[in-house]
Amino acid sequence: MTTELHTERLHLRKMKISDSPSLFKIWSDPEVTKFMNINCFTDENQANDMIKLLDELSKDNKAIRFSIIEIESNEIIGTCGYDSLDFENVKAEIGFDIARAFWGKGYASEAISSLIDYAFSSLKLNRIEAQVEPENVNSVKVLQKLNFIFEGTLRQYERVNGKFKDLSIYSKLITD
């Protein structure tokens, strides 16, 4: 599996520990983490721990997370990746986050588009899915822009800070 992808404006590469300061800045913004399944970070060590956890998952080809680097500024502006890879069922779940300063510039859809292309062409997957809180309108717009299909609502699917949250599930098939 690749550890790098490229688009016109972005370089996606597997996260590394040296990304911690940049990722901590992103993951410590409550607006960025509002709809993520993590609490807003308060210490850079949390970013280190998250990178180590994701690295462990990638060793078994169960997941891979990329740092998204804007080529022009060489700045890490977010992350994206396959949150779960299921080769037996030929599918993956994707996820992404973008630093607030870079919202609304098409970076999320550009990064996710490269994940989709790689998943279908190189990994030979059949299905890509995304789970998103219905209130996360920006992420829903990205998925709609990339022609993901809304499949339904997973009622009270996860518990966040003691409260049950619904998740909407979207998918894209290789035949779409």
Image: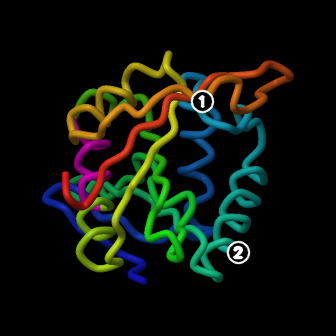
- Badge 2 local density, few (<14 within 10 Å), some, or many (20+)? some
Look at mark 2 in the image and give the residue it sits on: 56
Residue 43 as seen in the image, left or right of residue 162: left
Q: Residue at x 61, y 39 (%)?
A: 27
- Asked which secondary structure carries label 2, the reply is helix
Image coordinates of residue 84 in percent, x first then y, are 57, 61
Q: Is residue 163 above or below residue 82?
A: above
Residue 132 as seen in the image, left or right of residue 172: right
Look at mark 1 in the image and give the residue it sits on: 154
- Badge 1 local density, few (<14 within 10 Å), some, or many (20+)? some
Residue 160 as seen in the image, left or right of residue 150: right
Q: Residue at x 47, y 28 (%)?
A: 152
- Amino acid at dot 1: Leu
Q: Give the Cα distance between marks 2 and 1.
A: 28 Å
Q: Earlier in the sequence, mark 2 or mark 1?
A: 2
What predominant SS class does the magenta segment belong to?
Answer: helix
Q: Residue at x 26, y 32 (%)?
A: 144
Residue 28: quarter of image: top right
Foreground label between 2 and 1: 1
- Amino acid at dot 2: Glu
Range of the magenta residues? 106-114
Residue 167: quarter of image: top right
Asked if residue 113 is among those painted magenta in the image, a careful observer would answer yes
Q: Residue at x 76, y 21 (%)?
A: 164
- Asked which secondary structure carries label 1, the reply is strand
Which residue extends farthest left?
Answer: 8
Comparing 125 with 102, the one in front is 125
Residue 149 as seen in the image, left or right of residue 91: left
Comparing 5 with 73, the one in front is 5
Q: Is residue 169 above or below residue 138?
A: below
